[in-house]
């Protein structure tokens, strides 16, 4: 019996010799030739957004020179005299600088922690609702406060805390029901950091939950099926599967929030507190302080200096937070 003839060895495409006079084609050469054309298409698509970003974010940076001048409208930016760092020292040597900086950092820290936690909790709770006829209306209801004007929030809060005409209020009536004394909320600065934090949770909790819900949809269903096969309950899967897998999203939101920690929420705080000096010890932030200084003194140089200080500190903080995030969790880093 003769042995079967060995099958011919077919060389792989990488080892096929190129014909004489022709350069061998490298894998992906076609994709590389198309890349410049695709890049131009992407740049044209992004051109409107880049133009808006340049006009409204980068072009106004030319006005930062006002921070180093004694600006007056008559002489203009070019004719106003240089004063160096006097505008910065004026703010930091004033007696209000420490209080304003402490309030800004403290309130923003409370806002950031509260909105992240409430958004995460709401997202997990909404994800556990199986009926889409119940989940969709609830999601819309908790997202609606994000669109409510700060002026409307101020009116609602004033009605709850002081009532119509400055007497009573729903909160004081509730305190009276439990035999507790009434509180003159608009003359007591102590509770206001917590009141403003509750307002921020009401405003941004639903908005933040939408971001976490979008991240939940990217979690593979097989992970939950494996947990169910292991006998895990829905509560355990939410605690040990959903929450840990949302950590990269929470880290990115935290890094972005740290970059804005020196910027106070001017719209909400000023609409609620206004010029009530009694509440300034716990509610006066950099933005409200700058607004009052500009309105009363017309000092454009000082306001520009404070704005530049906020931007520089914010850039440093977000850079440091990004590097720390990249060091300990590369998947949750922005770069």
Image (cartoon, rainbow, N blue to C red):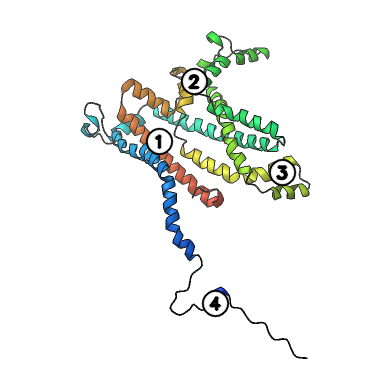
Residue at coordinates 55% horizontally, 48% vertically from top-left? Answer: 332
Q: Secondary structure at mark 1?
A: helix
Residue mark closest to the camera, 3 vs 2: 2
Residue mark closest to the camera, 2 vs 1: 2
Q: Which mark is residue 237?
A: 3
Q: Quadrant of residue 53?
A: top left
Q: Are marks 2 and 1 in contact (CB under 8 Å)?
A: no
Instruction: Using the numbered discs, state the Cα–Cα distance from disc 3 to disc 2 in whole angstroms.
Output: 41 Å
In the image, 333: left or right of 76? right
Q: Quadrant of residue 296?
A: top left
Residue mark closest to the camera, 4 vs 2: 4
Instruction: Using the numbered discs, state the Cα–Cα distance from disc 1 to disc 4 in whole angstroms.
Output: 61 Å
- Residue placed farthest to the bottom in the image? 1
At label 3, counting other C-alpha atoms closer than 10 Å, the crowd grade (few under 14, some 14-19, many 20 or more) is some
Q: Which residue is mark 4?
A: 15
Instruction: Using the numbered discs, state the Cα–Cα distance from disc 1 to disc 3 in whole angstroms.
Output: 42 Å
Residue mark closest to the camera, 3 vs 4: 4
Instruction: Using the numbered discs, state the Cα–Cα distance from disc 3 to disc 4 in whole angstroms.
Output: 51 Å
Q: Which residue is mark 2?
A: 151
In the image, 118: left or right of 320? right
Q: Secondary structure at mark 4?
A: helix
Report the front residue among 43 and 189: 43
Q: Are marks 1 and 4 in contact (CB under 8 Å)?
A: no
Q: Secondary structure at mark 2?
A: helix
First-in-chain label (1 vs 3): 3
At label 1, counting other C-alpha atoms closer than 10 Å, the crowd grade (few under 14, some 14-19, many 20 or more) is some
């Amino acid at each position: 019996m003769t042995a079967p003839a060995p099958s011919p060895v077919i060389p792989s495409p990488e080892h096929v010799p190129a014909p004489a006079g022709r350069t061998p084609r490298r894998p992906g050469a076609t994709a590389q030739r198309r890349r410049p054309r695709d890049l131009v298409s992407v740049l044209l698509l992004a051109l409107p957004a880049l133009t808006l970003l340049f006009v409204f974010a980068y072009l106004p940076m030319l006005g930062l020179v006002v921070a180093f001048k004694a600006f007056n409208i008559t002489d203009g930016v070019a004719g106003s005299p240089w004063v160096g760092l006097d505008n910065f020292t004026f703010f930091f040597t004033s007696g209000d600088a420490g209080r304003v900086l402490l309030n800004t950092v403290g309130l923003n820290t409370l806002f950031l922690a509260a909105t992240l936690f409430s958004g995460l909790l709401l997202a997990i709770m909404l994800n556990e609702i199986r009926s889409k006829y119940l989940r969709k209306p609830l999601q819309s209801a908790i997202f609606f406060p994000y669109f409510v004007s700060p002026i409307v929030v101020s009116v609602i809060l004033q009605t709850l805390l002081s009532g119509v005409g400055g007497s009573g209020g729903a909160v004081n009536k509730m305190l009276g029901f439990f035999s507790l004394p009434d509180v003159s909320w608009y003359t007591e600065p102590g509770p206001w950091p917590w009141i403003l934090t509750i307002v921020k949770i009401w405003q941004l909790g639903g908005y933040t939950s939408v971001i976490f819900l979008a991240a939940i949809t990217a979690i593979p269903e097989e992970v939950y099926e494996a947990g169910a096969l292991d006998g895990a309950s829905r509560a355990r899967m939410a605690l040990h599967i959903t929450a840990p897998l949302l950590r990269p999203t929470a880290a990115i939101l935290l890094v972005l929030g740290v970059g804005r920690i020196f910027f106070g929420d001017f719209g909400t705080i000023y609409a609620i507190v206004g010029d009530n000096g009694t509440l300034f010890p716990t509610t006066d932030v950099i933005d409200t302080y700058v607004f009052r200084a500009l309105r009363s003194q017309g000092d454009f140089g000082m306001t520009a200096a404070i704005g530049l200080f906020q931007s520089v500190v914010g850039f440093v903080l977000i850079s440091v937070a990004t590097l720390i995030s990249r060091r300990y969790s590369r998947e949750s880093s922005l770069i």
